[in-house]
Amino acid sequence: LMFNQCFSAFFIILDYYLNSKNPDASNGMEILKAIKKYNPNIHVIFLSGQERYGVAMQTLQKGAEYYVIKDNEAFGKIEKILSGITVS
């Protein structure tokens, strides 16, 4: 991925499964690694239907700051998270 040619971001909301129809497609963990390599200061919020504790821990260990499970309250949770992130 060529992030420097694609965008400049302060935060990114990323899903674990990005393309369920193509088994060769990158997943959110691969994209997270690329984002953090490009710019470790970008805030990453993982939004996922994966409720397994191990998946959540992996994303946090690889640099995501938050892990939000997709449910009826997910967007409210993300709104609260974003209101707490300050632009430096």
Image: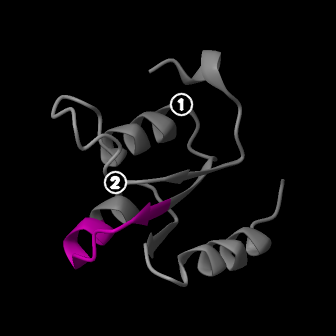
Front residue of 80/40: it is 80
| Residue located beneath label 2 in the image | 16
- Magenta extent: 46-57
Q: In this view, does 69 lie to the left or right of 29?
A: right
Residue that protrudes farthest toward the left in the picture: 23
| Residue located beneath label 1 in the image | 38
Secondary structure under the numbered disc 2 in the rendered image: loop
The percent position of residue 61, horizontal first and vertical second, equals 35, 62
The percent position of residue 26, horizontal first and vertical second, equals 29, 34
Q: Which colour scheme is used?
A: one colour
The percent position of residue 57, horizontal first and vertical second, equals 30, 70
What crowding class fits label 2: few (fewer than 14 Cα within 10 Å), some (14-19), or many (20 or more)? many
Secondary structure under the numbered disc 1 in the rendered image: helix
The percent position of residue 48, horizontal first and vertical second, equals 38, 64
Residue 88 higher or lower than 60, as above or below: above
Q: What residue type is labelled 2?
A: Tyr
Q: Which amino acid does label 1 sit on?
A: Tyr
Residue 71 higher or lower than 36, as above or below: below
Q: In this view, does 87 lie to the left or right of 50?
A: right
Asked whether the residues under the numbered discs 1 and 2 touch, taking CB atoms below 8 Å apart as contact, a structural biologist would say no
**Mark 1 or 2, which is nearer the eye?**
2
